[in-house]
Image: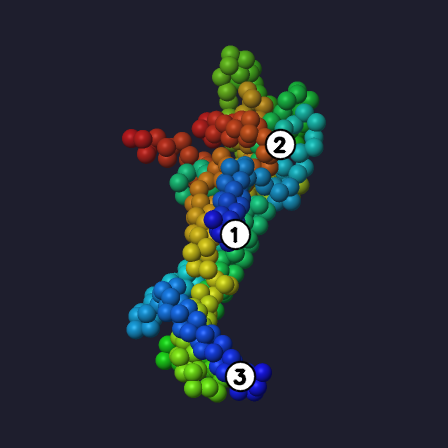
Amino acid sequence: MKRSWHITILVCLLLLAGGGAVILLPRIVPYGQCSDIYRQYADTEGITATFIKDYPVNDTVAVDVTLLAATTDSAWSLLQERFQVPPLNDVAQQLIDSGKDIVFTLQASKIDGTVELGNDYDKLLGISYRTKQISVFHVKNEDAVRAVLFHNLDKSVQQN
Amino acid sequence: MTTNDIEKELQELWDWQACRIDTLAALPEAQPQRINTAQKGTWRHRLMVKYLALGLVSLAAGITALAALGGDAILRIQITGYVLGAVNAFIAVNSLVTFAMLLRHHPAKEGTDSMSRFVHRMNMEPRYSGQQSAVSGQQSVDSRIILNSQLSILNSPLVPIRQVAAVSAAALVVLVSVACTPIGDGHAMSTGDRAARAEAIHNVETILSQI
């Protein structure tokens, strides 16, 4: 076979291998493009922070999500304080102890670095008491707000 | 040995060489085999269409690669877009340049290019009566040289059509695959650990399902 064909086949294989590597390797969001909340808690001991870019809430809406999971009681206390998570009453605590989960929703306002509750918000917090996790949905418009809040309603309507 | 004897020997040697050239020019291998002058225009036209199509497709693919992948948030995909854009741009430029060369080189101009003029200048005027057959043999060899030079122009070593088309096809496959296939597990996340990624997605789905 001619030398030119050797080079051609080599170039083609390099292109295909490079494309295969791009497709198979997971997509990692650069640190600088993650949310402020992620960068704030990424190095905090006892907290596992994960940032998900463009998480598909439904077929048309995708939002960025920052997931904060507390692995220790002290870390969970810190998150409760920072995010103003309301404490559970006795009944709710019994439900949690029996294995059920309670997910509480809060709205957080547009302040970088810290989270404050308010009407002018760009974050929806989903707080899971049983798993001690806070999921921050970074909503940019009304469609995203509606998609997150009425996610289960939309799903049941579609199923029916 | 007299001068006449020397001339006679030279004449015999010349005639022998002329006969040898005639014999060589008459061999099947010396005949122009690949291109019939009458069909040359059709073959040239088909080649032009191939190069033009290859050039335009590569140009479109390069622009698409830069637009679709070059602006992605992931560095790896950005680099893929730039590499595919560069490869397709190189193929497009070479193909379109070769197309332009083919467009300029018209069969009607056969014999007027520089290679033909050089070959004709090399022909020497016959000095002896026995050189007529040598000239006819030389002319047959000249026509083969002209055709080969035109062949080398038309089959430009810069753009061997089959090899470049193969590379262009591979680049197109990579472009379509990267642009249309979900990368990795389909999510862009801050961590590359597969277990952590799967767990995070599961936790978000669980919370979302209970809101």
B64, B26: nearer the viewer:
B26
Q: Where's residue B143, x and y in %?
A: 41, 75
Kind of residue at disc 1: Arg
Can residue A136 be seen here?
yes
Q: Chain of mark 1?
A: A
Q: Are marks 2 and 3 on the same chain?
A: no
**Image color mode:** rainbow
Q: Nearer the viewer, mark 2 or mark 3?
A: 3
A117, A31: nearer the viewer:
A31
B27, B97: nearer the viewer:
B27
Decide which of tag 2 and tag 1 comes sooner along the chain. Answer: 1
Q: How much space separates mark 2 and mark 3, taking CA atoms?
A: 107 Å
Residue tagged 3: B5
Residue tagged 1: A3
- Please name the residue shown 40% across and 70% down the image: B23
Instruction: Tell me the tag on residue A49.
Output: 2
- Please name the residue shown 40% across and 79% down the image: B133
Q: How much space separates mark 2 and mark 1, taking CA atoms?
A: 53 Å
Instruction: Tell me the tag on residue A51.
Output: none
Can residue A127 be seen here?
no
Relative to A120, does residue B47 appear above or below in the rendering?
A: below
Could you classify mark 2 by the number of other residues whose Cα lies within 10 Å: few (under 14), some (14-19), or many (20 or more)? many
Give the image quarter of residue A87.
top right
Q: Chain of mark 3?
A: B
Relative to B156, does residue B132 appear above or below in the rendering?
A: below
Kind of residue at disc 3: Asp
